Image (tube, grey):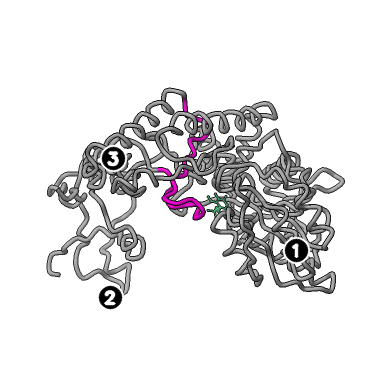
Amino acid sequence: MAEKTIYDLSRPGRTGVSLPACDVPEQPVDQLLPDWALRRRQPELPELAEIDVIRHFVQLSTLNYHVDKGLYPLGSCTMKHNPKINEAVARWPGFGLLHPHAPEQAVQGALGLMHQLAGDLEQISGMTRVSLQPAAGAQGELAGMLMVRAYHQQQGNPRGKVIIPDNAHGTNPASLAIAGFEPVVLKSGEDGLLDLERLGKLVDEDVAAMMVTNPSTLGMFEKDLPKAARMLHEAGALLYMDGANLNALLGRARPGDLGVDVMHFNLHKTFSTPHGGGGPGAGPVGVGEKLEPFLPAPTVERGEDGSYFLDYKRPDAIGRLHGFLGNFGVLVRAWLYIRMHGAEGLKRVSELAVLNANYIRHRLSGVYELPYDGDCLHECVFSGDRQKALGVRTLDIAKRLLDYGFHAPTIYFPLIVHEALMIEPTETESLQALDEFCEAMIAIAAEAEQDPQKVTSAPLTTPVGRMNEGKAARELNVCCRVALAGD
Ligand SMILES: Cc1ncc(COP(=O)(O)O)c(C=O)c1O
């Protein structure tokens, strides 16, 4: 049954507001506006009481699945609970109503917050300097790669290749290609980790950098990263680390200490901000000493008198990556999240993220295939090959999970796992929630054996059934179409 639109609910004369009496002399509208600007017919606005509007939108908000509704184990997306205090503070007028053109003296608090946040990220990561400008993880990657390019150009040898392990996040090869490099794929070892022998054969004078996702898309820690860094540095190349999965490392390992020259953070993943569906994010980029001169301009600095200012005089900077100073609201949320947790709290975040993923890995390991069976960090990747042999694909399992009240994991990624099911429970889920999720996964595996058609025809209980997702993404149409009188 099609959902009712707000126009279907409209009844003539119903209203949800009572406006105060007009306290200025009323004038006919045709005396206020020129003829060409006048409407030819009344707008067809729905007429509704407040209760109708509230119920309609509350009902709509529950049709889709979201993180406030239940466990959202979408691997690589870190869909954890976003503390509501973040939202409240980001809306404080002193933050939410700042004008982007306000002079520096008038926004010292905001600049101070940014300066502190960059400093916190430097401490957390062990990198020398951080720029908060990039608006997303992928833009942070691009910033990093542009700095790598600028560095090699300044060294007088503009190298052309970047090594990319086959377990890297999908945005990594795209970013290096946009920055003008040619990707060279490094096949992972049997254990799913960096293969140093193969790496040794790829590193040469034309390699500008290697771009590693750590923990990788298999949810595993790249234990040989320091050795890889040494090999690259000896050949004059740099090491980029995609640090979007940093919730697994907080307080445990710092990329700067592992030999990383440049990295990005995903504030919206690691430090909690509602994200998904292309919502605003922030992908700060951190660098070691070699790349510091190339950081995007302006940087937020603190003068000797203690006041904050923007430094545009950075002759080697790669330029500006974002209008004004980035997605400021996201920065406020991340700053608050870090400050409220403190060092010990952040350590606990990584502990729980890793514990929760390993709990799921253990509970489901006899039921779904585990192609790489070492301990994982923040996420675990199963293969649906066993179920596929019964005629049930990973896509079907993902759809059936919706009937059990859970969002699906990431599926068919990473590409190096057949029928991949990439599960990231995050640190904010309770044991009870993890158990309920595991029981649903176990029940679906049993259905695949006993009643496969139930799984292949899922979802059976959602507002819409199985859709052509490719078409939905490419021909997105979110308009509310209303037939206007006279149309
Ligand atoms: C490991 C990893 N790298 C990069 C990205 C890209 O980040 P964004 O979506 O903010 O561009 C993501 C996104 O989830 C990610 O998980």
How many circles with numbers are drawn on the protein? 3
Give percent across and percent down for residue 10.
16, 48
Horizontal side of residue 203 vs 92, given as left or right: right
Q: Nearer the viewer, mark 2 or mark 3?
A: 3
Q: Residues within 10 Å of mark 1 (few under 14, many from 20)?
A: many
Specify the quadrant that holds the C terminus: bottom left
Q: CA distance from mark 2 to mark 3?
A: 68 Å
Name the residue located 30 percent from the left edge and 62 percent from the top edge.
Answer: 477
Residue at the farthest top position:
432
Q: Amino acid at mark 1?
A: Val
Q: Amino acid at mark 3?
A: Ala
Q: Earlier in the sequence, mark 2 or mark 3?
A: 2
Residue placed under numbered mark 3 in the picture? 448
Camera-side residue of 311 and 269: 269
Residue at the farthest bottom position:
36
Horizontal side of residue 86 vs 115, given as left or right: left
Q: CA distance from mark 1 to mark 3?
A: 46 Å
Which span is picked out in magenta?
409-430
